[in-house]
Amino acid sequence: MKISERLKKVPPYLFVELDRLKNEKKEQGVDVIDLGIGDPDIPTPSEIVEVAKKALEKKEYHRYPSNLGSLFFRKAVADYMKKRFGVIFDPEKEILALIGSKEGIAHFPIGFVNPGDVVLCPDPAYPVYYLGTIFADGIPYYMPLTWENEFLPDLGKIPQEILEKAKIIWLNYPNNPTGAVAKKDFFKEVIKFAKKYNIIVAHDAAYIEMYYEEPPISIFEIDGAKDVAIEFHSLSKTFCMTGWRIGFAVGNSFLVSTLAKVKSNIDSGVFTAIQEAGAYALNNLENIVPSLIKVFKKRRDLVSLELEKLGYQFIKPSATFYLWVKTPKGFSSQEFCKKVLQDVGVVITPGAGFGKAGEGYFRIALTVEEERLKEAIQRFSILQL
Ligand SMILES: *Cc1c(COP(=O)(O)O)cnc(C)c1O
């Protein structure tokens, strides 16, 4: 048996050695603190769980769900998009429920990419943009996100011949792993660029509600965005619901309906009871989210302050639960992360794992309790560099 050429193109998993070392340390009885995981440690707020429990009893929900998502869920999404961003979406044509946003992001290129077409992917990034591209037989073109350019891609640097073959540009703000947030001017430039070169804009907004200062904007706050864009949202990080698998896509009706067509031939939608919990969460966002944000903000402030004291270089993130920190001089990101785990039992993620341009950085996820974060920082302070 042989795996496909397509699957062979998936790059090797860079965290193999770190995972092995982590397990080895645990077996040795080391109290490992894991700051590697992009998954909130806080349980889903109980009021959301209660809605789901009741919904489980509804016998009509035990049958196949609607492919596009129940209308009540899509209406909750439309209300949220209007209230939060001031943009009107038609729940029937411009909104689609997803089995988590990862699912939509991975499937989207299937609808638009032909063999040999190029997809513009940020680097460093969440890997699903280029993986979905590879699975659609497209070719990823990596746009480096650099400190100097505030972790935004420099669109002017993309070669003309790439632009001619490009079908989709992926963006993700607030950004994982850099914590960067994009402003209106950048999105304006993107929309203009996309129209000029006839490229679809696919924006991953998974962290749009996880912010500590100014609310990050939706790409649809830009005039004309609906002509060329689709945006992927997730309930996972916003409501600490990663295990539930629910998200949604909003945007241009042709883009949304094409993704729906792809999906209807692969999956059968989101369990309706989960959509009911999701709709409840979206409808009550202002009551639910602030107390969750408060927890992460405290952690962000604590770790930022202490890391700064220790002389680490990073930009304090105004959104996401990640810190993107420069590795000390003389270490590659892999070497440094290995050393931190080896010497003091703290797991952090090497930047190179998110792409070539991630080299020289490591990522800290604020997904453990404050006391553990304090302990982790204490351990950082005794590192011999
Ligand atoms: C967590 C994450 C997602 C996926 O979330 P789902 O649980 O699939 O909704 C998407 N994009 C980024 C950048 C993420 O970090």
Image: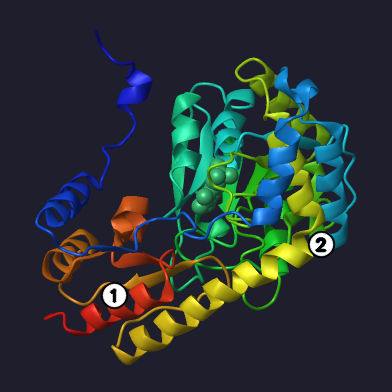
Relative vertical location of residue 89 with respect to residue 296 in this rendering, above or below: above
Give the camera-side residue of 347 and 63: 63
Q: Residue at x 59, y 68 (%)?
A: 181
Relative vertical location of residue 133 with respect to residue 350 in this rendering, above or below: above
In which quarter of the view is residue 214 placed?
bottom right
Count numbered badges in the picture: 2
Provide the residue designation for mark 2.
Answer: 84
Residue 384 visible in the snapshot:
yes
Q: Is residue 213 left or right of residue 59?
A: left
Identify the secondary structure beneath mark 2: helix
Quadrant including the N terminus = top left
Residue at the outermost bottom position: 309
Give the camera-side residue of 121 and 274: 274
Coordinates of residue 254 in the picture (x, y in percent): 79, 30
In which quarter of the view is residue 189 placed?
bottom right
Q: Residues within 10 Å of mark 1 (few under 14, many from 20)?
A: many
Given the image, on which type of amino acid does mark 2 rest? Arg
Coordinates of residue 376 in the picture (x, y in percent): 29, 75
Disc 2: residue Cβ within 8 A of ligand 1's nearest atom: no
